[in-house]
Amino acid sequence: MNPRVFPLCFMAASILPTTAFSQSFVSQYEGLPYHDSRYSGGPQQIPGKVLCAYYDLGGEGVAYHDTDPKDHGSGELNPADGTYLNEFRIHEGVDTPYTKFDRKPDPIDDNPFDKIVPPAELLYVGWTEPGEWLNVTVDVAHSGTYAADFLYTSNRRGTISVDVNGKDVTGPLQIATTNDSADPLAWRQWHHWNRAPQLFKVRLSKGKNALTVHIVTNGNMNLAYFDFKPVRR
């Protein structure tokens, strides 16, 4: 599967249609929903939070594309010590850190420059670069329109886009920067968390669907989750 590169024009959040999980897409896609000893697996559920760190199994070029093969979170930033969080998906190219609380003298992810405080020990995708992408298989409870909130950090005002079943449903989405010049610690610019409410809306068909999240411009974002909620009429 070769995800497209989209034109770099801004598209406001809107309701765009999508197709069912087509046989042509199924025949090309070989990824599987993530599972491990702690996470029982199966498609992630919509409505609900779709965690980026639980992207599909299948490896480089199938379930994801990363610009280098090393996980700069697990095993590097977080030393390999036999623990689940420090070694999460350690042998894959996608970079998977987790949120850290109560670190002294300098708080990390529960710092005073957060717009919203994330959950502690939340796995997320970091070290993002333009051209990278990841796939997540989801199971939609009911056909309908869903709005997606987005939990993230963005040091350089990056751009993402989202496919459903191989079809662009959002166009490029500008992610507001979380950079704050008041923070005296330069490294903490990657740990100012925020939530983008209703970043986009999309019509989804009941049952299995595949989401593809693309990093379009700038990178330097941490992707935690999309929280899909039905739009009430």
Image (spheres, rainbow, N blue to C red):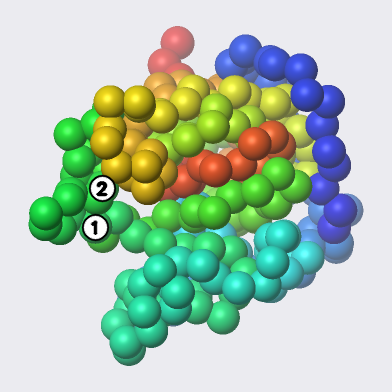
Callout 1 secondary element: loop
- Which residue ends up furthest to the bottom in the rendered image? 82
Q: Can residue 191 be seen here?
A: no
Residue 161 rendering spot, x and y as whole percentages: 67, 34
* Mark identifier at residue 15: none
Q: Can residue 183 be seen here?
A: yes
Q: Quadrant of residue 156?
A: top right
Residue type highlighted by circle 2: Asp
* Mark identifier at residue 109: 2
* Disc 1 and disc 2 in contact, CB within 8 angstroms: yes
Q: Is residue 93 above or below residue 145?
A: below
Q: Which quadrant is the N terminus positioned in?
A: bottom right
Which residue corresponds to the image point at 70% horizontal and 51% vertical from the top-left? 132
Residue 98 rendering spot, x and y as whole percentages: 34, 60
Q: Nearer the viewer, residue 82 or 198?
A: 82
Residue type highlighted by circle 1: Lys
Q: Nearer the viewer, residue 193 or 214?
A: 193
Q: Is residue 2 above or below residue 28?
A: above
